[in-house]
Amino acid sequence: MSEAWRPSCQVEQLRARAQLLAAVRAFFQSRKVLEVETPLLCQATGTDPQLDFFCTDGQRSVQRSSLYLQTSPEFAMKRLLAAGSGSIYQICKAFRNGESGRFHNPEFTILEWYRVDYCLHELMHEVAELITTLLEPHRVLGPTRIIAYQQLFIDETGLDPLVFSVEQYRDYARRQGFGEAIDICEDNHSMWLDFIFSHKIQPSMGEESLCLVHGYPAIQSSLARISASDARVAERFEVFVRGIELGNGFFELADAAEQEERFDQEIAERRSRRLPAVEKDRRFLAALQSGLPDCSGVAIGLDRLLMILTGAACIDDILAFPIARA
């Protein structure tokens, strides 16, 4: 008889997940942050060329339309913020097609929250408080490290990430034995930064501490505002523990025209790379036009956090039914 019906993880992992979710909810309840739910299946999705999505045909009355499993609840949560919800959080499923491996399952659990009137650094400190609260009963962490992306990049590579010289980047790749990067990244600055960060810098974050990296180059701004003091830098941070990326946070872009321009650029890049076509989320853009309050927001991958908490080597070890058994 096949054993594929059985869950992939042990009962102890199910208990650890339940305790983690309860601790997250207690953390936000103590701070009077409102828990919300938004749709997983929507009529629009993100345009980011780095993300693949699941799409299905919806049947509504006599009309058929495409529906998307959300890669993130971000757009819908910002519609709530624009409607006056105040600070909110959500624990939900998110879906990314084609992502499968030691740290990836196409369906995963995400914690996302938004703090009204928080600057980026206020949110970074709250992220540190939450993760320390969740991990310290199980693992002893060293002092939290907060460092600017530019400084970290220079310290680890000698390259300035805000000044792009393709010849310098190619020379660095040859010296490091990353020859394949020359063909992969060509003259795309953002792809060079991603490649070097993931192959050289991230693996060096192996210590047992929480690391928050802020001030990403503006070409990687995603949904973050550009810094008022340095147009080369975005108000964005990422969260790492033992070199594992746990989350991505922004001082949120509230300018509808700039957001639509970024959507157009991403759609054009998707077209040039022959990726599946997407439409701009016009309800989200309308919410920005209505007025998004100043806020900072972050998404944390709870499955990866549970891996760190329990010492699991693979995401399959902490999921009841990973994609192979779903």
Image (cartoon, grey):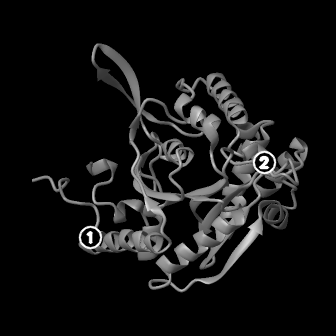
Query: Could one spot residue 129 in this view of the protein?
Result: yes
Count residues near mark 2 (Cα–Cα under 10 Å), then give few for <14, some for 14-19, many for 20+. many
The numbered dot on residue 226 is 2
Q: Amino acid at mark 2?
A: Ile
Residue 197 lies, with reference to residue 241, above or below; the image says above
Mark 1 or mark 2, which has the lower sequence index?
Answer: 1
Q: Which residue lies under the disc numbered 1?
A: 10
Tell me the residue at 46%/73% (across/down): 27
Count residues near mark 1 (Cα–Cα under 10 Å), then give few for <14, some for 14-19, many for 20+. few
Residue 41 lies, with reference to residue 304, above or below; the image says above
x, y percentage for residue 61? 27, 17
The numbered dot on residue 110 is none
x, y percentage for residue 97? 45, 39
Outermost residue toward the front in this view: 84
Tell me the residue at 71%/44% (across/down): 180
Task: Indicate which label's residue lies in the foreground, 1 or 2.
Answer: 2
- Front-most of 161 and 102? 161
